Image: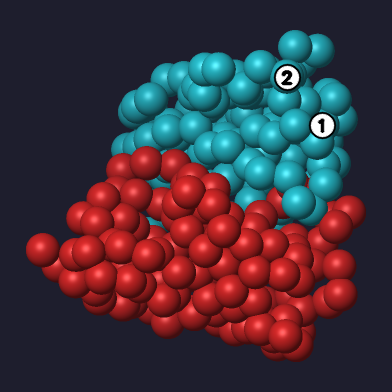
Chain colours: A cyan, B red
Amino acid sequence: KAGVTQTPRYLIKTRGQQVTLSCSPISGHRSVSWYQQTPGQGLQFLFEYFSETQRNKGNFPGRFSGRQFSNSRSEMNVSTLELGDSALYLCASSQELAGADTQYFGPGTRLTVL
Amino acid sequence: DAKTTQPNSMESNEEEPVHLPCNHSTISGTDYIHWYRQLPSQGPEYVIHGLTSNVNNRMASLAIAEDRKSSTLILHRATLRDAAVYYCILRGYNAGNMLTFGGGTRLMVKP
């Protein structure tokens, strides 16, 4: 099976712009989660989608949003970019919602905001 | 979510066993103990998980204390490829897929 794929891998934007990142989960996986990783804050949970519904949301401003499509692919959007949004954005997929379920991470999208 | 405490860093020699500790004194009865690791320039990858009993897989072993307030990830023979940040994470049975990452333990493996 192909792993989790994220596009693009690298992105450079300027302050005030908006950006859309894409994640394709492993085939058959219905849950997609997004994380932000920065040197200062580490790995932080953004949100989680299961069967097109947002199930959980982390403590991020409303500029961060996401959605999931019927084929389980997911996108996250960040509007009005700030310098502090520079980070590695990771997507993870899993089959179900149970606490024992394994999550599979993609390689991430490296976003640089200038 | 209950918190976990891990040492910031550990060092090991290649081909020797490594024991990575994790304290989780506020763990609840339905919390699973998960371990993930993140190799340089990669996304985290699953290592192992358990509930009450010790677990083994091809990557590692997980030893869980009888009172479940601590656990140890055991790499039986460390290789240079095992140099990574190791995260110990608790997940509730019905908590969905949100993972709460702490600082993890940075494992350095010396040749």
Q: Which residue type does callout 1 highlight?
A: Phe
**Residue A50 numbered tag:** 1
Q: Secondary structure at mark 1?
A: strand
Element at label 2: loop
| Left or right position of B93 against A41 | right
Looking at the image, which residue is at 43% across and 33% down? A107
Q: Chain of mark 2?
A: A
Query: Do dots 1 and 2 share one subunit?
Result: yes
Name the spot of residue B82 as percent of width and height, x first.
31, 56
Q: Is residue A1 above or below residue A111?
A: above
| Identity, as a three-letter code, of the amino acid under mark 2 | Gly
Of A51 and A21, the residue lying toward us: A51
For the residue carrying disc 1, how many other residues have a C-alpha within 10 Å: few (<14), some (14-19), or many (20+)?
Answer: many
User: How many residues crowd mark 2 within 10 Å: few (<14), some (14–19), many (20+)?
Assistant: few
Place of residue A70 in the rendered image (x, y in percent of width and height, measured from the top left):
81, 12
Give left or right: position of A74 versus B15.
right
User: Which residue is disc 2 drawn over?
Assistant: A28
Using the image, tell me which numbered label, if any, was put on residue B39. none
The label nearer to you, 1 versus 2, is: 2
Residue A42 placed where, x, y %? 47, 60
